[in-house]
Amino acid sequence: MSANEKGEKVKIIEPRTLKGFRDFLPEMMIPREILIDRVSSVYRSYGFAPIDTPVLEYLEILSGKGSDETDKQLYQFEDNGGRKVGMRFDLTVPFARFSAQHLAELPLPFKRYHLAKVWRGENTQAGRYREFMQCDFDTIGTTSSFSDVETALVINDIMERIDLKTNNSFTRFQIHLNSRKILTGLLEKLDIPDKAVPVLRALDKLGKIGREKVAEEMIAAAGIPSDKANSILDLVLLENSDNESVLNHLEKTLSGNENGLDGVSVLRQILDAASSLGIPKDRFVLDISIARGLDYYTGTIFETFLTDLPKIGSVCSGGRYDNLAGLYTKQTLPGIGASLGMDRLFAALEELGMVEKTSSPVQVLIACFDKNLTNEYLKIGSDLRKIGIGAEIYPEPKKLGIQLKFADRKGFACVLVIGSSEWERKIVQVKNLKTGSQDEVSITDLPDYLKKVL
Amino acid sequence: MSANEKGEKVKIIEPRTLKGFRDFLPEMMIPREILIDRVSSVYRSYGFAPIDTPVLEYLEILSGKGSDETDKQLYQFEDNGGRKVGMRFDLTVPFARFSAQHLAELPLPFKRYHLAKVWRGENTQAGRYREFMQCDFDTIGTTSSFSDVETALVINDIMERIDLKTNNSFTRFQIHLNSRKILTGLLEKLDIPDKAVPVLRALDKLGKIGREKVAEEMIAAAGIPSDKANSILDLVLLENSDNESVLNHLEKTLSGNENGLDGVSVLRQILDAASSLGIPKDRFVLDISIARGLDYYTGTIFETFLTDLPKIGSVCSGGRYDNLAGLYTKQTLPGIGASLGMDRLFAALEELGMVEKTSSPVQVLIACFDKNLTNEYLKIGSDLRKIGIGAEIYPEPKKLGIQLKFADRKGFACVLVIGSSEWERKIVQVKNLKTGSQDEVSITDLPDYLKKVL
């Protein structure tokens, strides 16, 4: 209980966030924004354009579009106008609706990225959140394998830029490649083309139950002869000695099958392009075991793993599909895309020490030593901003010790101290909080000095 | 009706957005992101740090915190766990909750900005949306007038950068200044200090019903003697010949009253600082008629008007308050801030022709002339990106006419055409879509050439 202005007792409402929801304080938000900015820059540099869609959609647009699980997790309600509405649970369904709705306005091929929050009321154990950020990019309206190559290169470019601490090119990751057409082709060659769904369902359990049990499931549940089940498992579990041998092996196994060879040919084009651009040989790995989704993906498939944190799973996944928006339009929209798991990636970067901790967006604090010099402090701040150096000015002439403690806690690099004697001599005392040193710098030399030390 | 893969009839769901909600296509989103980036850069350059809060809050945090109207407009529902929740209708209430909740982690003074969507189920006529973007910045934990000065300068800096077409410093705007303490002081001097609420309520109608009717309301509803009502109206409707005369007049009228003189002194500091930084004299206008909110604001008040579109009202408004988070914590948190009406401002920029129309985030299209040169196109694209020139590559070897039409429709500046004969000679045909001219450029000279023409 607290008292309001009239002296009445006022009940304090406990300030809290919903389970599974988070506030982002500056020390978390500043590096997140840097990551978002870097990722967006890569997308844009390839011609992917930003779009946005509403958080709320008609319920019929969203429900029944993901899995049974996403339906259960959907935040849905009736609005004041009696409409049944829901909060988006991913960015793919809204993009499908968007593409169908604006088809006439979109020059094809259409390349977009969408970086936004989505909501799922899932169980919150183990770092799962009910509000999280997705970051999708897609090319629709073309079946050209060029877009498969480009998608692989965009993933590579993004991943190379995720070190938020050193700004060095990051290399400790691998992009796994597969094509759904390889399995399709093999099933065609084995004369069981209609068994894709139960086979994929069984293969999905490989990590959990192992080869023997998966083979049993294929035989029992899908009615596949034992030798064919083993052929499938042999191919899926193919050891990757090197990409070239895998390609050769696949071409031999699938010889004569158009679908299968087509899938392999696209993978070869990706590897060739990567090699011709000087991307390290071990960056892309052929991995026939990755499947991603039972029905949605139809061609190339991508998953991206951090070498030092393989357990967390793929941080950027995607693939080619035949038809994005069949539920909303008769026009077939083939495409390819991938999604960066922003929150999972960010948690990984923190664990790997790749995030610079600061709660200040600028590195320079101008101390307030003499309130009569306010306009002079403002002028120094304004001049620094003009040359691209952000500066905060402490608002009150508190004890210098308090201001230095504030600067230290927030992670400023330098504090500029200017009293009347300094101002008369047109100099600044610069305290470097990282080294502990102090320099006397003339105001005219300040920009060059700061450019050097920051 | 449409047919799925198995030939079954599938009902097409009509792709549509909810009333009052919008999709943002690239031609709208690209300039919006530029505006957002410029605004955020200004905030950050002054040391305002980004934060974010959940879209959903406990209903008790949100309800009863705005007006009766915002309560009615609130998107609220019960989640799957039976919690009463609501979607935020502004960024101030979540910031108050956030500040109370994280007080121990926030070094004071705390400066934050928050750029995010909010939702209100309002009537949708006249360009009102139910989902729109707010863009708030605040300094809390200090009563220093320095922060009043800084807030004014931040608004000015943002507004100077809103011309998205020419990149010139924008000047066609004015920031109106007032202080709630002026009216408080006058009421104290008139011995009616408890009449602030009905007086403000009456003054709020000045634009609609005029001076006479407002005077009548003050006399009838608030029981204020006619001469005092007229003194109030004389001050509020003071013609602004020039800021200095207004300040002198205010100082005379309020002489001996601490509150009033204090308010005037802060306004004087803002005008002094602006003048010492060389900001044009007519940029800030003293305007005693702006009131903004009955109870919330307690000191300096800001409103910002576009000279060429005064009708649309203030595009950036704010002020000083005594206590941000009294509903959620016993600790008093004084502060000052303002909110940029992103959607209103953007609509105004479009109306004023200050938005560059393009649906491509890059200016260069590399045409696909010969599929065998794919890796060469990729290398040229990659080299351009490394020097900061984004480039899109057309994914298929379609007819050049189709590719040029695509480029034209999307607003690319240049198309690079490279066939096998060009590649052998290590040259590029550059079609400039703005001038219609075509140049033959050697691949080594391409970066310099493009830097010149773009």
Image (tube, coloured by chain):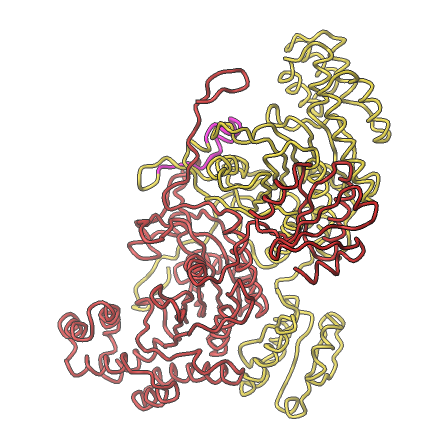
Chain colours: A red, B yellow
Is residue B313 placed above or below A201 in the rendered structure?
above
Q: Nearer the viewer, residue B323 or B128?
A: B323
Horizontal relation, residue A387 to residue A247: left or right: right
Residue drawn at (16%, 77%) of the image: A224
In magenta stretch: residue B65: yes
Part of the protein shown in magenta: B63-78
Is residue A282 placed above or below A335 in the rendered structure?
below
Horizontal relation, residue A151 to residue B448: left or right: left
Q: Nearer the viewer, residue B73 or A27?
A: A27
Number of on-image labels = 0
Q: Quadrant of the C terminus of chain A?
A: bottom right
Is residue B447 placed above or below B204 in the rendered structure?
below
Residue B370: image location, x then y, percent? 57, 86
Q: Nearer the viewer, residue A277 or A391?
A: A391
Question: Which quadrant holds residue B200?
Answer: top right
Residue A140: image location, x then y, percent? 48, 68
